[in-house]
Image: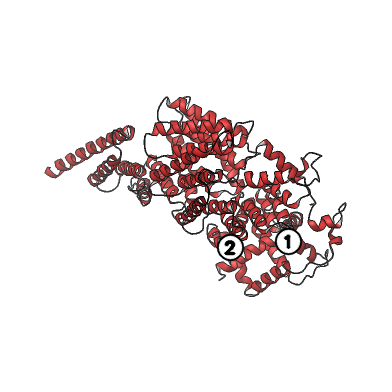
Amino acid sequence: MASSRQVAKLVQTVGSVSSGAILTLLGETQTTKSGLDAVPMLVHLVASSLFIQTEKATPEDLDRAQAFLCRLIRRYGTARQALEAISTGHRRHPHLSIERAHIWMQTLSVTPGLIDSTLRRHTAFNRMLTEWLDRRGHEIDKQLDAYRAWLDGPLTGTEAEWALPGMNVTEAAAGSAESEMSSQAQTGSPESQGADASIEDIDLIRSVVLGDKYPGDDPSFLPLTPQQREAAHRLAGSRDHFGRALAAVAFADFVRADTLLASLPESVPPEENYTLRGDRLYYDGRFDDALSEYIAARHAKDDLQRRLNVAVALMRSTRGAIDDAYKQATDLLAATKLDLRADSPDAARIGLLLGAACVHRPSVDRAQCIERAIDHFEGALVTISREKMPDLWAQAHYQLGIAWLDAPSGDRAENLQKATRHLGMAAEVWTRDENSGRWAIVHNAAGHAWERAPRGNRASNLERALICFGAALEVRTEAADPIGWARLQNNLANVWMQLPSGDHAENIQRAIECQARALEVWSREGRRVEWAATQSNLGNAWALLPAKDDLRDRNLRRAIACYKSALEVRTRSAHPVEWAATLNNLGTALLHLPPNKKGDTVKEAVACFTQALEVRTRDQFPLDWAKTQANLGQAWIKMPAGDVIENLQESVAYFQCALEVYDANRYPHQHNHVQTRLGEARKALEDAESRYRKATRG
């Protein structure tokens, strides 16, 4: 049976199948065909894997689908880019599956060491690749190696033969033009087309836009100010190859960026080359690959920006233990800060990064982490002037707002008031006109603050949250930022589900509509983690939707289906906290179904709650532990099978455990609710014991 190494090698080679290889096989180039035996097989493998088999499908349909795939490879340059065009819906064919193209893209977007674990989530697809390798035996290994050697082999012909119409040979050799200009280059001003790139524009994009990274930022959304956008447009239309590559990354035009990065001239310093490649990967969410490039850049030149890039990528890396990566990052930042003047802007910037690391670092002692973060942010603010460093000043207040928003200790209402105050100060600098992207980010955070506000009129607070999220949606549109737009749809859905004013059923229906819109984006973008989170939230909405009798049962079964779909991704090993939360919600939905005589749904609910407690321990997650304890108490009340007295004794014990955490002063609502349920359980237990005594005396 093929090994995981062989499968990973196959996947990587599939992604590298190039237009040049296909053109050579068709006799359209003078390059040798020796080493290309694997290419037709690989193209056929991909086409077959994507082919939608129906009763009416014919072998000719597969041939046409394969020919279409070849055309895409010739157009886009590689099989990887062709698959990306199919998976995003930019290119469609009636017999090619977008969903399977998503699977290819997932495996092609991770490092070789993660290909095996990625494919394990797609059992049938993994089996197909393994069986394909097994049928071809050891010979396929040699053919894959031969193709890789062909790719790395010498180029034939002269530069003049490859010059495009209207270009001189020098420009062609420097790679200064492409067959299709990006929309960003086309929209540059006439004066900038073909001009030299200015050092100021390059520094602005390289250091301010691409260099401004924080572990909590959304890398898929790179907000540009009008000034930065104009600079990027000038670079996109300039003569400078590095400047155009820089602009492509800033605009998140990764297809164009890959083309430009593949042919950067040797005059580009290696540290800049590695850094830009790392930025391209970082802002595409491929943090492990970005880390490798940043480390190489630091080896070439060990300076401040290179260190900061390595540190932030470490915080987002999935290699090894997360806590170890954070420690490496913070150690690097702390050591770097020691070499700087305490009152320098660079020291303040590192202080903000150290604070952000504390906010986002997974830790048992969450309260202590947030306290350290606030100390870092406030310490940085001492040396940051709003007049001289407005962006850094706004960033400090934004980070403080996020820290207070997440603070688990202290007075919750006071924490949220501090959060909204700091976010408001950030918005004074990051206005909609001057920096619409950051303005939207601040409004998104403010929406969360109002959503969580424990004091004041609940309906009014949630309506303010809706206004904040709605304002952010004016900037983060589906066309401009589909991922950010989908996240805001999720945020809106969560608020609609909680809103106590208006028609409850209509509010829940609005939530379901928001989540359905988000799911379309997650499916299209192949974002499995977000897809699972939305499935879980959609389950919550269906469970809350008011209805009667059969319709209520149908909604609950929809909720159960959503939770089970989410659990396909939210496994205990990959996402333990989310796995436990989804199991808890699944158990609750099962409890609300009418139980049969055997109590199958109640037993399944008890199993869900019991499993959830494996993660929701009292020490680490006391409130979640108490909630699940209370749910178990409710489940044992409803248990129709087994000894009634024993079931009710179990129920009383679980409710008592929940009350150990739900203190009457700190959590009055939860305490009163569980206390009422406990009273009901004790009354039922007394009645059952009374009936038993009467029966035994009789």
Residue type at mark 1 is Ser
Judge whether residue 41 can be spotted in this image.
yes
Q: Which mark is residue 18?
A: 1
**Residue at left 84%, top 66%?**
157
Q: Which mark is residue 112?
A: 2
* Left or right, 535 with reference to 80: left
Q: Nearer the viewer, residue 357 or 574?
A: 357
The quadrant of the picture occupied by the N terminus is bottom right
**Residue at left 63%, top 38%?**
478
- Give the mark toward the camera: 1 or 2: 2
Q: Position of residue 351 (x, y in %)?
A: 50, 45
Q: Position of residue 454 (x, y in %)?
A: 40, 30
Callout 1: SS: loop
* Left or right, 343 with reference to 631: right
**Image quadrant assignment for residue 65:** bottom right
Callout 2: SS: helix
The quadrant of the picture occupied by the C terminus is top left
Q: Position of residue 113 (x, y in %)?
A: 55, 63
